[in-house]
Amino acid sequence: MNIMDFNVKKLAADAGTFLSRAVQFTEEKLGQAEKTELDAHLENLLSKAECTKIWTEKIMKQTEVLLQPNPNARIEEFVYEKLDRKAPSRINNPELLGQYMIDAGTEFGPGTAYGNALIKCGETQKRIGTADRELIQTSALNFLTPLRNFIEGDYKTIAKERKLLQNKRLDLDAAKTRLKKAKTADTRASSEQELRITQSEFDRQAEITRLLLEGISSTHAHHLRCLNDFVEAQMTYYAQCYQYMVDLQKQLGSFPSNYLCNNNQSSVQPLPPASSNVIVPSVMASTSGLGISSPSNLSDLKECTGNRKARVLYDYDAANSSELSLLADEVITVFSVIGMDSDWLMGERGNQKGRVPITYLELLN
């Protein structure tokens, strides 16, 4: 027998097997043939594997969206990954915003309050951009890659063996059908032999599939470890961002008064630093839209007559020579002056005297 004859016979046998399976499948759908049911344990394992695959894909895709919201950038990264090439490094959104702020601050002048603030904010945004880049890299390596390996590796193997099991079942049920239809002793003997072979192949394939499916529990344990790594990466990222913003907020603490000085608006009531936990008032029309509330002693301060002691709540840099600079927690003497804006008092420390904003004070005694 030459190779061509062998191939022809193999093709004919494959075609016959395919036709037999197709007939069996169709008759099962029409209710004209019996179907061998898988045992409950195997069915449960198959269901668990399918459920794992579906949710792993959803979690993986949404994590990619979370880490990289730009769909075009995701497509580009996917293409480079398939080409087994490293995607070019591109500036991310926080880094770009930071650069714009730094450039603007430089042009406005680092010596101005606004320019200086823009530069400081820009530097912080660039740090956040670096942290964002590290989060993406760490999450991709420790979380997304294992999930993708399961979908593209383990589950594909499971799906292949599951399909093979389905074919072996169809062969088994087709053999059972032929045995029922056998009329002669020779045909019956041949059908019984075929049934034994197909039953053996089905049992063997069911065992292989079961062993693969039981590995899903190990997959869950592995994905749990990866999930912990992802949570830790996020925790590190958000902690870094929080610390960056706390540091920035401290740097900007004295900027409101400088801003007022730069714009010759010393009559406008300055706001305390945002880092304070104390609630500050809505003091003038220019600031009332911010929705800021007054402290409990605001009315007492506004009605202050005579000399009273007051504790300073926050640092305050005097905007001009008519004001008095303040240090948090110091105690000064305050009193009202006829004709002075109701949001200001006259403050006195030793031989130093000047206007002070009431929102920075807590009246004592």
Image: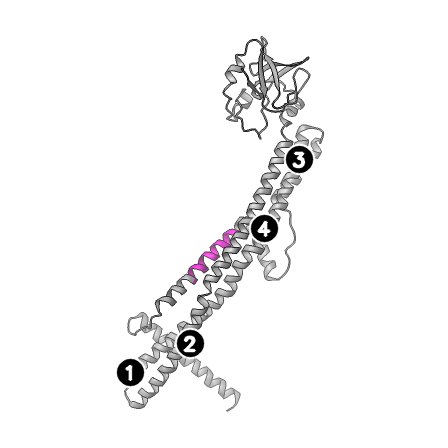
Q: Please tell me whether mark 1 sits on a helix, a strand or a loop.
A: helix
> In the figure, 108 relative to 268: above or below?
below
Q: Quadrant of residue 94?
A: top right
- The residue labelled by disc 1 is 181
Q: Amino acid at mark 4?
A: Ile
50 drawn magenta? yes
Of 73 and 94, nearer the camera is 94
Q: Return the x and y of residue 119 as percentages of the image width and height.
A: 67, 35
Q: Amino acid at mark 3?
A: Lys
Q: Nearer the viewer, mark 2 or mark 4?
A: 2
Q: Amino acid at mark 2?
A: Arg
Q: Main secondary structure of the magenta part?
A: helix
Q: Which mark is residue 281?
A: none
Q: Nearer the viewer, mark 1 or mark 4?
A: 4
- The residue labelled by disc 4 is 136
How far apart marks 1 and 3 lie (CA) works out to 87 Å
Instruction: Tell me where the magenta segment starts and ends, as one range.
Output: 49-64
- The residue labelled by disc 2 is 204
Marks 4 and 3 close (CB-CB < 8 Å)? no
Dot 4 crowding, Cα within 10 Å, few <14, some 14–19, many 20+: many
Q: Quadrant of residue 320?
A: top right
Picture residue at 45% right of the left edge, 69% below the top: 211
Q: Amino acid at mark 1?
A: Lys
Of 116 and 301, nearer the camera is 301
Marks 3 and 2 close (CB-CB < 8 Å)? no
* Of pointers 1 and 2, the one earlier in the residue sequence: 1
Q: Nearer the viewer, mark 1 or mark 2?
A: 2
